[in-house]
Amino acid sequence: MNVRRTLLLNLFLFLMWAHASASAAIPLQPFINLTPAGETLELRPGTYIGPVHISKPITIDGQGEVIIHGRSHGTIMTIDCDSVQVRNLRLTASGRSHDLVDSGVLIEANHVIFENNMVDNCLFGVHISKGNHNTVRGNLISSLIDRDIVLRGEGIRLWYSKYNLIEDNIIYQVRDMVLASSPYNLVKGNKISGGRMGMELIYSQATEISHNILSDNEHGIVGVYSDSLYIHHNRIQHQDKLSGSAVAIKGSSQTRIEYNEILDCAVGLTANSPIFPEDILYLLGNTFAYNSVAMFFYGDRGGHIIHGNHFQGNFQQVQVTAPSSAIDNDWLGNFWQDYVGFDMDGDGVGDRPYTIYLHSDRIWMDRSMAKFYRGSPNLEIVDFVERLVPFSEPAIILCDPKPMMKNQE
């Protein structure tokens, strides 16, 4: 029976390929229907018409020379069977409905591998819905670039999905990457640029985000009510929208942010006050360089652990809504480029604490319109007079008792 089916499939493919020489494109679904479970469908070069539905464990390999065209209607490829593999295809021209989540590919299964594909001119790129243990690797993904950024879809969207690997993809000119109610995923080695939010995690605890490069997005990595995130060895750069942060964490306890490079951003880190004592962040070994504001804390108390970080060339190291939201943090062993002090005993630690007081900073912190004058000669004069002859006792917002004299990287 298997031999007969193989012969029929080969005959069908030959007839369809012969027909393709006289037409621009042919439907792909019949090829999928005739491919036995467990077999590989290797398509000849050309353009095929979607949408397609894969409901059995097969492998599709376009060998880099196959286009699946969605004709601007619906989702191009739907996978609802476990252990499907899709490689080396180009999926283009999905529908444009946000309500229907029109995508390049919809994965509603487990143990699916979707790799080395190109997904372009699609509203949403890769949509995983209630799918676990899937791999999305090495793909090039973009959205509808003729739309305003807020009207595009997510490059990758996870919905109630866990234990997925999102690795080594290039994602550009999409709206966001979103993980919603999707814990225990690994997002590694991706390059994300030209979007609104590089990554947004909502109720997606215990997700690991590592070795990604996020550039020229409006916002970087945003974690909302997602406990135990592990964000490490990422580079977030050239993000200059005033309302955006390279990393923003809200209501997420026991999150570790380690060894990241945050460069040339409007705000490096935004974090709220811990609601409960255990709702703290661990910021260890990160580099904050050439940002307008390195860290912004809001709320009425601190409690975060901030050790061994490197602060260089930032216009302002820390901005607060209340002095207590930063002074209560555990600052220790950070390198501050603007530290003024000595190391008389040569132990590599400054002899006096690194301390930040509120002087003229209070003006533009309390009156947002005054930010326009930051760095201006007039505000510099006000700051100089305030430091020389303070009219009132300045508030302390930061004290690092053991500032490092040299960068420890």
Image (cartoon, rainbow, N blue to C red):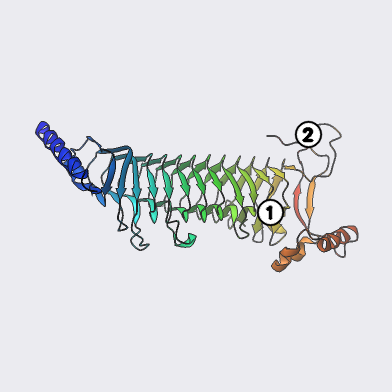
Residue 177 placement (x, y as % from top left): 46, 52
Residue 203 visible, this orientation: no
Residue 275 visible, this orientation: yes
Query: Relative to the observer, which residue lies in front, 322 or 73?
Result: 73
Amino acid of disc 1? Val
Read off the residue under disc 2: 348
Residue at 52% x, 42% y is: 212
**Which quarter of the picture shows residue 115?**
top left
Residue 120 placement (x, y as % from top left): 39, 50
Residue reaching furthest to the front: 22
Q: How many marks?
A: 2
Read off the residue under disc 1: 293
Image position of 398 (left or right of 255): right
> Which part of the image, by quadrant, shows the C terminus?
top right
Q: Which mark is residue 305?
A: none
**Which quarter of the picture shows residue 57?**
top left
Q: Relative to 99, is 3 above or below? A: above
Query: Relative to the observer, which residue lies in front, 40 or 63?
Result: 63
Query: Relative to the observer, which residue lies in front, 56 or 97?
Result: 97
Residue reaching furthest to the right: 389
Query: Relative to the observer, which residue lies in front, 350 or 276?
Result: 350
Residue 279 placement (x, y as % from top left): 57, 52
Report helix, strand or loop for mark 1.
strand
Report helix, strand or loop for mark 2.
loop
Amino acid of disc 2? Gly
